[in-house]
Image (spheres, rainbow, N blue to C red):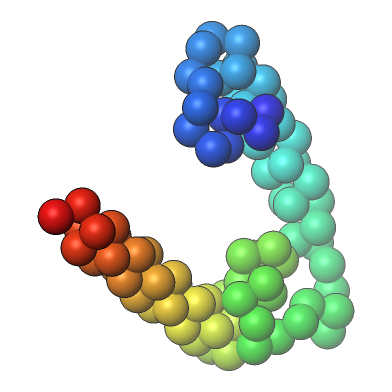
């Protein structure tokens, strides 16, 4: 399973294991989405991603996390291109 996540193996067995793992994960998350509104950590990217909350605060926290993630990836790829020259 870990090798699939890191891109090392795409054989049929690993793909099947990955599919089953994510199906179960989605089932658990859907069950947790039934969490009472008050119990969700609002204003966090985790509230958006883990609890499925789409309130304004959680949506904004998720958006900021994605902007930061994109900037970090872009910086890394730029650094890799510089080093490869």
Measuring from the top left, give residue 3's x and y in whole percent. Answer: 60, 29
Classify residue 6 by image quadrant.
top right
Q: Quadrant of the N terminus?
A: top right
Q: Quadrant of the C terminus?
A: bottom left
Q: Nearer the viewer, residue 31 or 62?
A: 62
Instruction: Identify the residue at image location x=31%, y=71%.
Output: 75
Please tell me how many numbered marks the rendered image carries.
0
Q: Nearer the viewer, residue 15 or 60?
A: 15
For this view, does 18 lie left or right of residue 32? left
Check the image and name the residue furthest to the top.
12
Residue 17, compared with residue 4, is above or below; it is above
Residue 65, compared with residue 33, is above or below; it is below
Instruction: Identify the residue at image location x=57%, y=29%.
Output: 4
Residue 24, compared with residue 10, is above or below; it is below
For this view, does 77 lie left or right of residue 41? left
Instruction: Identify the residue at image location x=72%, y=42%.
Output: 25
Q: Nearer the viewer, residue 69 or 54?
A: 69
Instruction: Identify the residue at image location x=46%, y=83%.
Output: 64
Measuring from the top left, give residue 73's x and y in whole percent. Answer: 37, 64
Measuring from the top left, give residue 39's x and y in whole percent. Answer: 85, 79
Check the image and name the residue furthest to the left.
85
Residue 71 seen from this side: yes
For this view, does 81 lie left or right of residue 38? left
Residue 63 seen from this side: no
């Amino acid at each position: 399973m870990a090798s699939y996540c890191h891109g090392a193996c795409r054989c049929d067995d690993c793909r099947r294991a990955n599919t089953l793992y994510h199906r179960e994960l989605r089932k658990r998350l859907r069950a947790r989405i039934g969490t009472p509104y008050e119990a969700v950590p609002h204003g966090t990217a985790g509230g958006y991603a883990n609890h499925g909350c789409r309130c304004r605060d959680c949506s904004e926290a998720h958006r900021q996390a994605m902007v930061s993630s994109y900037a970090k990836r872009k910086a890394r790829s730029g650094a890799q291109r510089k080093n490869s020259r």
